[in-house]
Image (spheres, rainbow, N blue to C red):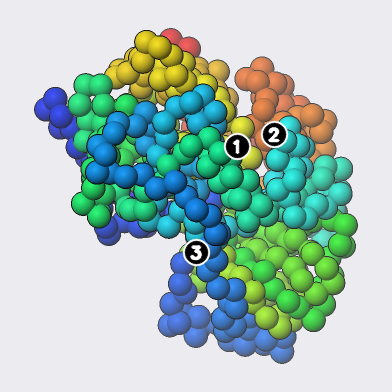
């Protein structure tokens, strides 16, 4: 956690400034990140009649795609238009979009063909609007939310799992057809001059371009902030597993299960969960294959992995789910909310480090797929023109293209939603989502997909408050005045 919370040093005042990526700070992947689990911690969780899935080793091995990439030749010393650090979904999507304008792009990554380790879930209409629905490998016609033991919401909105292989293959094919080049290396340092920037790589090569874009993930130290990064954190432990059986409907994905009856014989866990609740997220693929994930929606400070795992063991035991094989394991840590990067600055950002993660939900992949073309168009207006607008005008155009005033204001509103959720215990969370999913689908769907205007968000808030139970209204009034004041202050500053 020290890596995430370490303050960034201010840029030197000299004309030529530098930024370093420290080897002690491995970048977090842009949605969900895998970590090895310390055996010492796992030994504290005791096996049950239904088995302790935590003792099972994931069977899936790291995969790589097979492409003949266009390798950049540093010996030519040719200048590039844009260098993109990272080949996650954000980096490749932006490279694909920029290259459509004839802009010379090079993606720098030590393993550009490695498969992404993350499971990405999206609302189907989000990918349909981007003509990416062919990259979904499973679609559920509906989603469900267990508010408590006696109430379940059914959401008439199809949900899909992204095929990592299909999406990465599609983006790579488009990049290659448009002439995008690749360089296999890790970036250690960025240096700036008035009209160009250069990266220094761990292989000793130096590459120069008019613009550097950081798409390397949350933990990057290349992006500067003016305010403390007071994130909330979403943390989860998930497994893609073969099970003997499970209780889930195959035509519905389980978006949230807030029930806590599985903790009836676990007084410590039940007390902890009542204060800092977690829910189960489940994607059933067939009667024996399911993705299961115990999730803390948002907390500050972050809830511990060991706590998440203990709750998941108790939940699966209560549901009678016996895990036979763990195919994949996923350990997720997503910084949410917090301040935007300094706008503008000399390094552009896309993905996790750019602030596009939904502050209230942690969703990002569909939003990044949608915003990359917007950013590409802004950059192309400078580098794709015959005038070749570079330097400060380029940085200003790019950053304000990604974060115009309206989008900054709506993000402040979503961040207010996160701050509200941070104040709610289990009963408060149940009441909130009970009222939230009773809203007109236009509003709850628009909120989850980050597509509501500021006016629509205000109407949503009024409607939500009106539908909330008396205890929920009391919670909002008594627990959320400080976040509300911060929201109003931020909106005033943005409008000034």
Q: Label 1 belongs to which residue?
A: 369
User: Marks 3 and 2: CB-CB under 8 Å?
Assistant: no
The numbered disc on residue 90 is none
Alpha carbon distance from label 3 to label 2: 28 Å
Which residue is at 61% across, 32% downward?
A: 370
| Quarter of the picture holding the C terminus | top left
Q: Where does residue 58 sit, x and y in percent of width and height?
A: 58, 76
Q: Label 3 belongs to which residue?
A: 34
Q: Is tag 1's residue or tag 2's residue first in the polypeptide sequence?
A: 2
Which residue is at 72% across, 36% downward?
A: 131
Q: Secondary structure at mark 1?
A: helix
Nearest the eye: 282 or 465: 282
Closer to viewer: mark 3 or mark 2: 2
Q: On the rendered structure, is 96 left or right of 39? A: right
Q: Where does residue 6 sit, x and y in percent of width and height?
A: 29, 49
Q: On the rendered structure, is 365 left or right of 438? A: left
Q: Label 2 belongs to which residue?
A: 130
Q: Where does residue 25 sit, x and y in percent of width and height?
A: 31, 56
Task: In the rendered view, tell whether residue 108 sits above or below residue 100.
Answer: below
Q: Secondary structure at mark 3?
A: loop
Alpha carbon distance from label 1 to label 2: 8 Å
User: Marks 1 and 2: CB-CB under 8 Å?
Assistant: yes
| Quarter of the picture holding the N terminus | bottom left
Q: Is tag 3's residue or tag 2's residue first in the polypeptide sequence?
A: 3
Q: Residues within 10 Å of mark 2 (few under 14, many from 20)?
A: few
Identify the residue at the far left of this view.
Answer: 14
């Amino acid at each position: 956690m020290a890596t995430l919370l370490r303050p960034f040093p201010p840029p030197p005042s000299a004309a030529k400034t530098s930024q370093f990526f420290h080897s002690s700070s491995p970048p977090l992947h842009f949605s969900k990140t895998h970590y090895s689990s310390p055996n010492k911690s796992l030994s504290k969780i005791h096996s049950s009649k239904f088995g302790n899935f935590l003792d099972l080793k994931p069977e899936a091995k790291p995969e790589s795609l097979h492409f003949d990439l266009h390798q950049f030749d540093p010996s030519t010393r040719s200048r590039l238009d844009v260098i993109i650090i990272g080949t996650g979904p954000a980096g490749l999507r932006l490279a694909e979009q920029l290259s459509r304008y004839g802009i010379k792009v090079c993606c720098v990554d030590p393993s550009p063909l490695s498969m992404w380790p993350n499971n990405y879930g999206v609302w189907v209409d989000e990918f349909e609007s981007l003509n990416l629905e062919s990259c979904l490998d499973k679609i559920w016609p509906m989603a469900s939310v267990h508010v408590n033991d006696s109430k379940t919401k059914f959401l008439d909105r199809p949900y899909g799992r992204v095929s990592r292989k299909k999406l990465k293959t599609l983006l790579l094919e488009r990049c290659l057809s448009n002439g995008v080049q690749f360089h296999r290396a890790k970036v250690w340092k960025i240096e700036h001059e008035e009209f160009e920037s250069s990266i220094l790589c761990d292989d000793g090569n130096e590459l120069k371009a008019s613009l550097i874009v950081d798409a390397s993930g949350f933990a990057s130290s290349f992006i500067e902030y003016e305010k403390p990064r007071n994130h909330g954190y979403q943390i989860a432990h998930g497994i893609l597993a073969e099970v003997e059986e499970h209780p889930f409907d195959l035509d519905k994905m389980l978006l949230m299960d807030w029930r806590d009856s599985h903790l009836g014989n676990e007084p410590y866990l039940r007390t902890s969960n009542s204060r800092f609740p977690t829910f189960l997220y489940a994607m059933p693929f067939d009667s024996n294959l399911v993705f299961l994930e115990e999730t803390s929606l948002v907390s500050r400070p972050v809830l511990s992995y060991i706590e998440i795992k203990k709750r998941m063991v108790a939940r699966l035991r209560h549901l009678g789910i016996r895990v036979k094989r763990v195919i994949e394991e996923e350990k997720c840590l997503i910084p949410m909310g917090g301040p935007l990067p300094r706008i503008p600055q000399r390094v552009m950002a896309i993905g996790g480090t750019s602030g596009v993660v939904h502050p209230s939900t942690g969703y990002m992949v569909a939003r990044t797929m949608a915003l990359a073309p917007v950013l590409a168009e802004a950059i192309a207006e400078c580098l794709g023109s015959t005038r070749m607008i570079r330097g400060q005008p380029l940085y200003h155009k790019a950053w304000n293209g990604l974060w115009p005033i309206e989008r900054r204001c709506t993000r402040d509103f979503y961040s207010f939603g996160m701050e509200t959720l941070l104040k709610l215990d289990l009963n408060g969370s149940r009441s909130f989502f009970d009222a939230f999913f009773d809203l007109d689908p236009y509003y709850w769907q628009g909120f989850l997909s980050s597509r509501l205007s500021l006016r629509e968000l205000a109407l949503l808030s009024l409607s939500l408050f009106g539908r909330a139970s008396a205890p929920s209204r009391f919670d909002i009034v008594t627990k959320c005045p400080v976040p509300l004041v911060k929201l109003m202050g931020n909106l005033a500053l943005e409008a000034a």
